[in-house]
Image (cartoon, grey):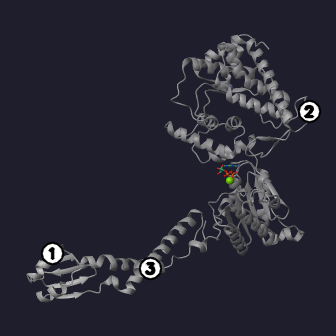
Amino acid sequence: MERPKKPKKSSISYWIIALCVFLALQAFVFPRLFQQSVKEVSYDTFISMTEEKNIGAVQIEGSQITFTDKNEKQVYRTGTLDDPEMIQRLYESGAEFQSKIDSTSNPLLQFLISIVLPIVLMILIFRFFSKKMTERMGGSGSMMFGMGKSNAKIYVKSTAGIKFQDVAGEEEAKELLTEIVDFLHKPERYQEIGASMPKGALLVGPPGTGKTLLAKAVAGEADVPFFSISGSEFVEMFVGMGAAKVRDLFQQANEKAPCIVFIDEIDAIGKKRDGGQFGGGNDEREQTLNQLLTEMDGFDGSKGVVILAATNRPEALDPALLRPGRFDRRIPVELPDLEGRIDILKVHAKKIQLVDNVDFSVIARTAAGASGAELANIVNEAALRAVRLGRSRATQEDLMESVEVVIAGYQKKNRVLSNKEKLIVAYHEIGHALVAAMQSHSAPVQKITIIPRTSGALGYTMQVEEDEHYLMTQTEIENKIATLTGGRAAEELVFHEITTGASNDIEKATKMARAMVSRFGMSEEFGMVAMETVQNQYLSSDASLTCSMETQTRIDKKVSEIIQNQYDRAMTMLKSNVAKLDELAKYLYEHETITGEEFMQILNRSGALVQ
Ligand code: ADP
Ligand code: MG
Ligand code: ZN
């Protein structure tokens, strides 16, 4: 990796500083040095010394008189008074006297000190701060002149670089990117047949799925220069600077072609232009975007400049960026599936010391929905835990525990629940587990615990799907909602009192029920009508309503109806198996954590469940 060289600091500024120091010394320090041991006396002492003829040299300097005694041993000083006879007296005393033209009244020096010095100082201070500022804004170079420079990092291919093999899963994305790398290496093959490469490719997907990593892998694979810059680095304080940076970047890229330009988090500059309805909009950002669009049109693809960009907000990008001829190839980088998760775990497990008999598939199944970044984190947490426990290798157990850490946070050491609370939590969790176990289409229970976590969970029931689902049936969603309400139902059944502990369950159940009605067309009342649209499929599943207020009221009613129905179902199941509920809850209360096998054993031990 190499950065463009900084221009050398000009030596003129050193000379200016030296001059200032000299002038300051000249004006304030040197004169004082020669005035040691001056004795301040009153004017009448001066008069009496004159009359005693005990006076040597006298110097009148502005408003002060400096004089010595006859033997010139001691220097005295006093202020002048309006004394017309002074000259006469001095003359009579036989003293040597003169009025001095002092250094500060030298007009040239005075001019230098009072006008030139402050100006020079101000210029220096201004330079200092504006440089600090450019540095902070990510600019390089000196002051104004460096502000329009792009500071894209240039990666040169190195053996230590990231390769495609370091990116696990994401096969489709790798395939599409491999083609681009291949084109840069052998353009003739493509030109012969008349194919031209897409000018730009946009990597889209949720955070942490390896978009930046893929781009780095492209840099590692391609034998061409690779410019990498983040969208936010174009955002500048002054209008026009971002555009200048874009221009500079593309100029550099054109010189180095064939090469790859990578703009990470492009949404920072590529957001939709709003037509200025809100007081003119953001001029600076628009100018930067316009410049980018112009530059992308400006060069022809055959030259071999490929632009990669990454974002997790594709819906927010300006449509002009996405039209053919610009970022016309869209490369989805999705959350990994089960296979992908196993592969990612394996890639990262190579970096740590691990015992041999680790079963990654269990961990990958438990970590359903985790992104690549989270999986990397899980492996690292496992290694940290092993060190904490004084082991030299991480084990399966470390990995399992760190999945829970990533999902639910660390175990809380200091929060000790009261016995009563512990019992309520135990019943709550067994309520979930029992309802889950009594329904056919629901994932098996893997673990139940009532050890509080730093995320705020007082306990949880972990269910792990046997295999991956891409579709969910209506029954499955309903079963999930019933399972979620099982906790609260158990509390009410046993303690005739409800607690705040179910808030998270309620939230999840509501989201599911609402999606059933407004997005999945799973209610008879509304049928297949979309009443919500998801804005961003990657950052959150929050949707915005696209229906009238009146319909919203009806949706809300329907949602609470669905949840109530499932709650009633869960309650019935628990009521008819209250003995099992008691037995399991007591067991969990004593053991604090039980595995899915223990749970099933107790469940099957004494008699079948009542359906
Ligand atoms: P983003 O998509 O947000 O740019 P990154 O590329 O920055 O995500 O990924 C963050 C980290 O997660 C990477 O440095 C890597 O350690 C890990 N990671 C993500 N996806 C993968 C993957 N497919 N294979 C291996 N590691 C991955
Ligand atoms: Mg990234
Ligand atoms: Zn719960």
Q: Which mark is residue 57?
A: none
Mark 1 in CB contact with mark 3 (< 8 angstroms): no
Amino acid type, callout 1: Asp
- Residue 21, image x, y percentages: 38, 77
Where residue 527 is drawn, which disc sits there? Answer: 2
Against 91, is 504 above or below? above
Asked if the residue at tag 3 contacts the one at tag 2, i.e. Cβ–Cβ closer than 8 Å, the answer is no
**SS class, disc 1:** helix
Name the residue located 79 percent from the left edge and 26 percent from the top edge: 560
Residue lying at the far front in this picture: please name it.
84
Residue carrying label 1: 44
In the rendered image, which residue does mark 3 sit on?
115
Foreground of the two, 420 or 271: 271
Q: Secondary structure at mark 2?
A: loop
Q: Which badge, 1 or 3, is on the more N-terminal residue?
A: 1
In the rendered image, the quadrant that contains the C terminus is: top right
At mark 3, the secondary structure is: helix
Q: CA distance from mark 2 to mark 3?
A: 83 Å
